[in-house]
Amino acid sequence: MTILPVIPTSPDQPDAVTTKRRPSMPPRHLADLDLAARKVAVTTLGEPAFRAKQLSTHYFGRLVRDVGAMTDLPAASRERITGDLLPTLLTPVRELACDDGATRKTLWRLHDGALVESVLMGYPDRVTACVSSQAGCGMACPFCATGQQGLTRNLSIAEIVDQVVYLAGVAASGAVTGSPPRLSRVVFMGMGEPLANYPRVIEAVRRLTAPAPEGLGLSQRHITVSTVGLVPAMRRLIAEELSVTLALSLHAPDDDLRDELVPVNQRWKVAEVLDAAFDYAARTGRRVSIEYALIRDVNDQPWRADLLGRLLHGKLAHVNLIPLNPTPGSKWDASPKPVEREFVRRLREAGVATTVRDTRGREIDGACGQLAAGELTEASAGGAADAEVAQ
């Protein structure tokens, strides 16, 4: 494990870990606005309209997040723009790397002290960013570190986009070893339930996929939006006419177990959730990803593999099995490899395309919410986190 540079935090700094603030949305940022709204914003500041495209080219095209580095802008303009259109949204608390630099995780502190995480994963043919859409999560899945923290608040459009722009800049710097120097994929699989922050997540997707300089210019087909199964929002997504991949965090094929593992199942049952997912696939032509965290002696029985196979047979879907990355002190653990292999065999025998997710980041608390949970635990133990960060 490599520990990357950490931003020092002093005890009297207002963003110190031990300081609790009331959750609040951040100030307006360039990424909250489309190009037309940016033109209105800069002219309101007394700047010429072309400044909107200039700023957008810096931010989305050149991945420059610091106004001070935009040296082709007059100094007086930079000062005005900093506070009104490019305020600091994310402050790094801790950055870790493993897999010889191919996996990099960042813990961020937001303006109100809330903590979120994002991960950059490099492969020989692509670089993927995993981003958060909420600080914490209100879905309360018992095996998930984020779910056990509860929901602090939704992220703004710009707080979501700024994670991606930062990670795209890391990729462009060549820091992700053995991978192309360009971010090509984004998955909304970090902290939070994306469809519970629906309007902002959809606008963030539009910003990420809009051509430069209005957006980052990513392909919609390279964006994945996950959900635990908020059926009304899933059906609303169908009407958006986007071509993003929908990932359904199923984790159990039967209602009895899923009621426990994914509490929202008590409102929308497996059949209803799968119907919405299949309707999305039929409307978009995009194969739905069924996410299934294999948990030892909980949901890994052969009969559950057979049931899942029957539910998905002939559907435009594939199963992404996830070896559980257990949180410290948790009663949940990953299934043994022989059990995992038998689960895969039965699904494939049923005609269901199945893959096992690459296990990365275990040594850097790679599962969503683990770094934030550790930071909060340290803070509640009397400020130990501050002492570590300040080293």
Image (cartoon, rainbow, N blue to C red):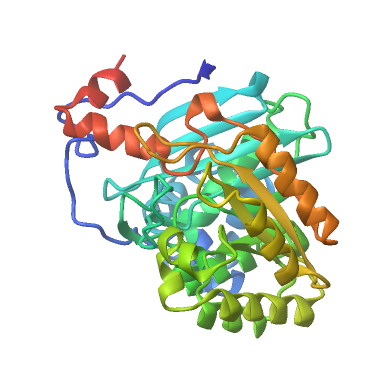
Residue at 79% from the left image edge and 72% from the top image edge: 315
Where, by quadrant of the figure, is residue 339 drawn?
Answer: top right
> 47 or 14, which lies in front?
14
> 350 or 15, which lies in front?
350
**Is residue 276 toward the left or the right of residue 76 in the image?**
right
Where, by quadrant of the figure, is residue 241 drawn?
Answer: bottom right
The reply to whether residue 34 is in sight is yes
**Is residue 223 toward the left or the right of residue 204 in the image?**
right
**Is residue 115 toward the left or the right of residue 57 in the image?**
left
Instruction: Answer above or below: position of 368 versus 48.
Output: above
Quadrant location, the C terminus: top left
Q: How many marks?
A: 0
Image coords of residue 310 (percent x, y):
74, 69
Image coords of residue 17 (percent x, y):
23, 35
Residue at 27% from the left image edge and 50% from the top image edge: 112
Q: Residue furthest top?
A: 391
Image coords of residue 174 (percent x, y):
71, 27
Quadrant location, the N terminus: top right
The reply to whether residue 53 is in sight is no
Instruction: Answer above or below: position of 296 versus 177.
Output: below
Q: Residue furthest front?
A: 303
